[in-house]
Amino acid sequence: MNKKIFPLMAAAAMMLLTACYHDKHEFQPNEHDGTAVGYVSPQLSWENETDTLNTLDHIQITVAGSNGTSANQSFGSVQSTAEWLQQLPVGEYDLLVTADMDEARGYVLNNVTHSATRAEGDGSINTLPDTRVSLRNPSSSPEQAWYGVTSATVKADEVTIAEVSLQRLLASVTVVIHGVPAGTTVSIAVERVAHSVLLTTRDGNGRYGVPDGEDYETVSLGTLAADPADAATLRRDDHTLMPTAGGQQRCLLTISVTTPEGTPLTYLADVPRMECGKHYLVELDYADLRPYMRFEAMTINDWTEGWTISGEILNPTNK
């Protein structure tokens, strides 16, 4: 169930607006062509309730209608979005909300031509431009960002509340390797990572946000070094990255090891694909590393999956 962000604010705003605009003259027809108008106001919620503690400070709302009318505005807080009212000619509209998805955090947004997957009648949003988001540096592990898409009907002389559920954009991965010999260095990279995500395109399950299938990236999770004095547990926690590229059923983790003697070794982990908004955990012992390892998914909770070799649970405490 989605958890609303300040739901009473939206309700209060609607009551206030109803009181303020009850007279017909407050809903003045469009001054250019005389069409009837109404208002739309967004109400934001979190898809993942654990995100409710986040403070958003860069929110962009874009509204587009089948009649060609469009509007957009930026906000510095959730509170300010609840107070936003956009006057629009009556009709059907689509809304895209992006949150903390700005250049300062390393995100790049571009509008692209509608793809073939958005043909008329396929259920996709066709009034909004297809917004493509990518990372300036795919390996940078930026802070999480959110987005949401919804539709609304603007009626004459009425205020429409448009509910928007904010979805996480990035996947995140944690890699833990136990018993690494002293003096060993380990570098980890994820292959087949999508270059970008199309926010207003639906996938086969009707969910907005489709990873690009044209360009792949290799994302570095960095290099870890075992304490020279002793064997160690090496871990890379919560590294954020784009999901697996579209059309790829699985992705790859390349684990590059340099032994204390300077010998390079490479291990390939064949793992299930990563999706937007989910967290992935792989935990194994250094002694279990093999040139090729196939991992399968183990559900830990709604938003986290563990990756286990050949279906064997390596860490049975994570159930």
Image (cartoon, rainbow, N blue to C red):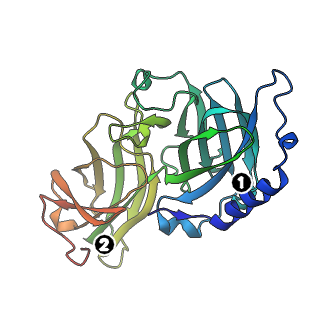
Q: Is residue 280 above or below residue 270?
A: below
Which residue is label 1 attached to?
81
Disc on the earlier residue, 2 or 1: 1
SS at mark 1?
A: helix
Label 2 to label 1: alpha-carbon separation: 53 Å
Image coords of residue 51 (percent x, y): 52, 65
Image coords of residue 269 (percent x, y): 22, 51
* Tags 2 and 1 touching, CB below 8 Å: no
Please identify, in this view, whether the residue under mark 2 or under mark 1 is nearer the observer: 1
Which residue is label 2 attached to?
182
Q: Nearer the viewer, residue 312 or 237?
A: 312
- The quarter of the image holding the C terminus is bottom left
Image quadrant assignment for residue 52: bottom right
SS at mark 2?
A: loop
Image quadrant assignment for residue 300: bottom left
Q: Residue at x 63, y 55 (%)?
A: 43
Q: Residue at x 73, y 46 (%)?
A: 74
Image coords of residue 310 (percent x, y): 12, 58
Image coords of residue 180 (percent x, y): 27, 70
Q: Nearer the viewer, residue 262 or 181?
A: 181
Please state if 31 lies on the left or on the right of 2 as rendered: right
Q: Visible in this render: residue 195?
A: no
Q: Residue at x 49, y 53 (%)?
A: 168
